[in-house]
């Protein structure tokens, strides 16, 4: 049965699919989002939180580009914490606990309000491909939906299989069917598929936890928010709780190893090294007598708690006995077990930087099917795939972010250039220019770029300009105003900072590690009045931006100089039909890798494993001769 025609069909209603569909529709494309279950759009399958180290930067970037993840997070947030404040601002990372049910419902409400976007509950079993170009999809109900582009965001559902001890069954999430058929068709089309594994812990009835024996972890006293739009920070925060395993817990867990799918070989896919299951932790870190756990509330109106750090696929009875050995959880009852899930993914070296596949034109992959893990990593891929699918069918240039512009650019470059051998998670250490790619300046970096393509609206652009003007005014006061010893020394003594003997600029005080921007307000009426005059919605952002820009100016300038040098070669375009085997000065490994990867620029070539700096120099000379 032929169905209505669309410009773009997005397959999958997770974080990648939702952002892809919203972006494409906002850019004026008639878009259809097809999901197996409309009730679980953007369900938080694992922990009920957004952000964290590097992930918080990604959510801010998605928001700055006009995505919806930051807005949904702010509207459903029950706790906010800024992580790594004891370190430099490049490491500061916002994180929010969210109300799990409200998160999914809010996403659905927002999607239902997007012009040009329709939602259909069904399962896509095949894509329609003719002459190497995608032309739509076929669903389980037998519908044929024609479209100019298709974005696949199937998450962990592609041939998904769930494991709890010796029990296993097909599923995309516990209680939900897998997506069957697409992987086989992709292989027929010439795509490579491989298997990965991820997992999740038990969900616990909070009424059965003795919280008096756990350590309370409150949110920040002055919580911030994720979105640069007019959302609000949380007013009533809900605490998390800190717990620990013990040596007895570890001994109990070991009794289930002979029935663990991880150790009996029934799971072949690689799991995430940075977020291992509890059984994997006690093997890899055998010298540790205990491991940290976090009991995280799944919402304001539920008793369910997520035990972060206790992911497991051991037999249910072993999970329960181990749980009961942890202080505070002796009487705990659970709502559902921890489990592992193994699923198909497509190695992302098969993609262009727009996330369009190299093998089939107008077909895009985004999210966990590219070998990533995490809501944030999925959301940013979906956003970029949706943007590029829309731009391509409109005949407009692609939208690609490089490593100097965004964590999103780092992530996609890593995926496309290096591929993955385990579920990919973003870390600040992956970004070479993280002083420039901070969570506080994502709007300044990215909103102008998104506004230029028509995604970020005029109001967002005005907000960026207001913030810039406010920061400029505050910077001028800090750099020009002075303070006397009698005015300053009381504050300096209170902050444990050496007294001054003569009149100094406010800037000189701000450069001290003990002094924050807020401390200057008590020293300068002019500065305090200027801050008071800034609109409340951007006041905190403006003050934070000035402090970072002035306090870390030398580091920022040094990194900008490095970026300028690198960009000279980064964007040198390379034809896709180069005969690398004919360039004898290249190492054989380099010729082999370059032929396989077909990089679009010198910069991309330089990041391919096996391509040495000497090989890059050869390519630069080769391209110079080619241009002449």
Image (cartoon, rainbow, N blue to C red):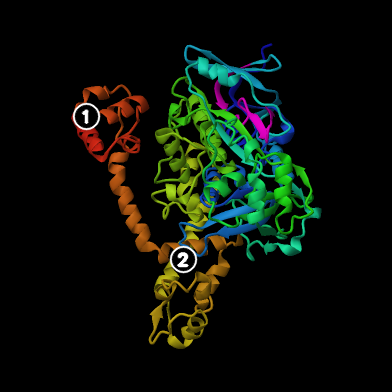
Q: Examine the rendered structure and indicate whether residue 435 appears above or below residue 341.
A: below
* x and y, in percent, of residue 68 in the image: 61, 42
* x and y, in percent, of residue 107 in the image: 68, 40
- Image quadrant where residue 67 sits: top right
* x and y, in percent, of residue 207 in the image: 81, 54
| Image point (75%, 61%), residue name | 211
Which quadrant: the N terminus?
A: top right
The residues tagged by marks 2 and 1 sit, at their Cα atoms, a distance apart of 45 Å
Q: Is residue 369 left or right of residue 612?
A: right
Of the pair 560 and 396, the residue shown nearer to us: 560
Q: Is residue 164 magenta?
A: yes
- Image quadrant where residue 329 sits: bottom right
Residue 153 visible in the shown view: no
| Image point (65%, 46%), residue name | 253
Residue 321 visible in the shown view: yes
Q: Examine the rendered structure and indicate whether residue 164 appears above or below residue 550.
A: above
Q: Which region of the structure is painted magenta?
A: 145-170
> Which residue carries the number 1 mark?
627
> Which residue carries the number 2 mark?
547
Which residue lies most toward the right here?
207
* x and y, in percent, of residue 275 in the image: 56, 46
For disc 1, the neighbor class at 10 Å (few under 14, some 14 to 19, many from 20) is few
Q: Examine the rendered structure and indicate whether residue 136 appears above or below residue 233.
A: above
For disc 2, the neighbor class at 10 Å (few under 14, some 14 to 19, many from 20) is many
Q: Is residue 599 magenta?
A: no
Of the pair 374 and 4, the residue shown nearer to us: 374
Element type at mark 2? helix
Q: Is residue 229 left or right of residue 347?
A: right
| Most common SS among magenta residues | strand
| Image point (41%, 53%), residue name | 436
């Amino acid at each position: 049965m032929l169905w209505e025609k669309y410009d773009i069909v997005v397959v999958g209603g997770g974080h990648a699919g939702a952002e892809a569909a919203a972006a494409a529709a906002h850019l004026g494309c008639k878009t259809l989002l097809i999901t197996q279950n409309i009730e679980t759009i953007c369900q938080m399958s694992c922990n009920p939180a957004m952000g964290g180290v590097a992930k918080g930067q990604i959510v801010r970037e998605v928001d700055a580009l006009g995505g919806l993840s930051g807005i949904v997070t702010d509207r459903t947030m029950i706790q906010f914490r800024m992580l790594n404040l004891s370190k430099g601002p490049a490491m500061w990372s916002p994180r929010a606990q969210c109300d799990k049910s409200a998160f999914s419902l809010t996403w659905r409400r927002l999607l239902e309000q997007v012009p040009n976007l329709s939602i259909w509950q069904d399962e896509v079993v095949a894509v329609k491909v003719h002459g190497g170009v995608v032309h739509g999809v076929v669903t389980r109900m037998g519908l044929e939906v024609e479209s100019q582009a298709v974005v696949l965001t199937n998450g962990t559902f592609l041939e998904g299989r769930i494991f709890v001890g010796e029990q296993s069954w097909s599923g995309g999430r516990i209680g939900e069917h897998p997506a069957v058929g697409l992987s086989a068709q992709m292989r027929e089309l010439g795509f490579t598929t491989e298997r990965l594994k991820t997992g999740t812990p038990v969900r616990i009835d909070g009424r059965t936890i003795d919280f008096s024996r756990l350590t309370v972890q409150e949110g920040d006293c002055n919580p911030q928010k994720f979105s640069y739009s007019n959302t609000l920070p949380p007013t009533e925060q809900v605490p998390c709780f800190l717990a620990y395993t013990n040596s007895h817990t570890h001994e109990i867990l070991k009794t289930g190893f002979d029935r663990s799918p991880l150790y009996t070989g029934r799971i072949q896919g690689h799991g995430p090294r940075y977020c291992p299951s509890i059984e994997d932790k006690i093997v890899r870190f055998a010298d540790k007598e205990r491991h940290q756990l976090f009991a995280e509330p799944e919402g304001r109106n539920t008793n369910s708690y997520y035990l972060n750090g206790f992911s497991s696929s051991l037999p249910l009875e072993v999970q329960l006995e181990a749980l009961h050995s942890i202080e505070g959880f002796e009487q705990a009852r659970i709502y559902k077990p921890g489990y592992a899930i193994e699923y198909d993914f497509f190695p992302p070296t098969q993609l262009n930087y727009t996330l369009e596949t190299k093998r089939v034109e107008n077909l895009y992959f985004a999210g966990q099917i590219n070998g990533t893990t995490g809501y944030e990593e999925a959301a940013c891929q979906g956003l970029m795939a949706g943007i590029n699918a829309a731009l391509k069918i409109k005949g407009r240039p692609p939208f690609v972010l490089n490593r100097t512009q965004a964590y999103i650019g780092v992530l996609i470059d890593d995926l496309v250039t290096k591929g993955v051998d385990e579920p990919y998670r973003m870390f600040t250490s992956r970004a070479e220019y993280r002083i420039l790619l901070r969570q506080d300046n994502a709007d300044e970096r990215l909103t102008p770029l998104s506004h230029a393509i028509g995604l970020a609206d005029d109001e967002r652009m005005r907000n960026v300009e207001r913030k810039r003007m406010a920061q400029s005014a505050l910077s001028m006061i800090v750099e020009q105003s002075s303070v006397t010893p009698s005015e300053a020394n009381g504050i300096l003594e209170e902050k444990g900072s050496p007294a001054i003997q003569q009149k100094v600029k406010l800037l000189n005080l701000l450069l001290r590690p003990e002094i924050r921007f807020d401390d200057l307000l008590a020293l300068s009426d002019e500065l305090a009045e200027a801050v008071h005059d800034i609109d409340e919605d951007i006041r905190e952002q403006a003050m934070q931006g000035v402090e970072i820009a002035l306090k870390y100016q030398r580091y920022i300038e040094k990194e900008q100089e490095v970026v300028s040098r690198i960009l000279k070669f980064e964007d040198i375009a390379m034809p896709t039909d180069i005969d690398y085997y004919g360039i004898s000065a290249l190492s054989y490994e380099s010729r082999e890798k370059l032929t396989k990867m077909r990089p679009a620029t010198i910069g991309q070539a330089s990041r391919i494993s096996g391509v040495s700096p000497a090989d890059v120099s050869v390519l630069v000379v080769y391209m110079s001769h080619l241009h002449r």
